[in-house]
Amino acid sequence: MSEQEFAASSSPAARATLDHLFSVTYEELRRLAATVRRGNANPSLSPTALVNEAWLRLARAPELHAGSRLHFKRIAARAMRQLLIEAARRRNAGKRGGGALLISFDDALGHSPSTSQELLALDECLNELARLHPRQAEIVESRFFGGFDVAETAQLLDVSEATIHREWRAARAWLALQLRRSL
């Protein structure tokens, strides 16, 4: 769908809301993109390019309804994750590499996936976690790719902060085990 088709298919109010949410979260999304893609050797996905590509993807979505700033950040984080995965798949097309996966899920996001293999392994494990424990996968995606803190994640998922802490720990442990097994 072209930008013109999107504009014709969306109500002006919905488009204005989406534009406003993007503009108020742009710098935050750019900082997040820099954190998530730290160490990525793909120069075509600078933080600015990643955020802008995510915005273009979101702007073309015919049924996108982001009711709040948190909800919009979550949708944008998912779009950035998908773009990073697609770029990693393109770079790895036809290749199979070894090596240790060095992904860490500490609260400060001390280490983000730095290679295509790490990012693809993380995506595969997150997809499996989503099948087994959907809320835990949402927590990881919100915290790791969305940059949400515990309070924002709890508000977004409508659960207590204690639940977020508990399930974040469980999800990190499960992912670490799965990533080690995938070597």
Image: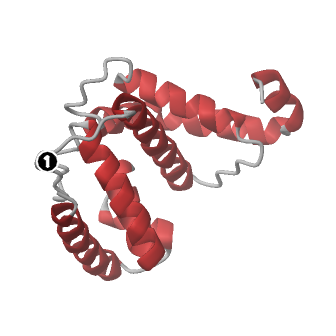
Q: Is residue 115 left or right of residue 12?
A: left
Instruction: Indicate whether 150 appears above or below 55.
Output: below
Quarter of the rendering occupied by the C terminus = bottom left
In percent of width and height, residue 156 lies at 49, 65
**Closest to the observer, 127 or 56:** 127
**Closest to the observer, 35 or 26:** 35
The amino acid at mark 1 is Gly
Q: Residue at x 49, y 52 (%)?
A: 74
Quarter of the rendering occupied by the N terminus = top right
Q: Is residue 180 left or right of residue 67?
A: left
In percent of width and height, residue 167 lies at 31, 78
Q: Residue at x 58, y 40 (%)?
A: 21
Disc tally is 1
The image's colouring method is secondary structure
Q: Quadrant of residue 43?
A: top left
**Closest to the observer, 121 or 77:** 121
In percent of width and height, residue 111 lies at 15, 46
Q: Is residue 75 left or right of residue 132?
A: right
Instruction: Indicate whether 75 appears above or below 61.
Output: below
Judging by the rendered image, the residue that carries numbered circle 1 is: 110
Instruction: Indicate whether 109 appears above or below 39.
Output: below
Residue that lies at the very extreme toward the top in this rendered image: 43
In percent of width and height, residue 171 lies at 28, 72
> Could one spot residue 182 in this view of the protein?
yes
Instruction: Count neighbours of disc 1 (C-alpha within 10 A) and say few if under 14, some if 14 to 19, many if 20 or more.
Output: few
> Could one spot residue 133 in this view of the protein?
no
Q: Residue at x 83, y 35 (%)?
A: 12
Residue that lies at the very extreme toward the right in this rendered image: 8
Q: Residue at x 77, y 42 (%)?
A: 62
- The kind of secondary structure element at disc 1 is loop
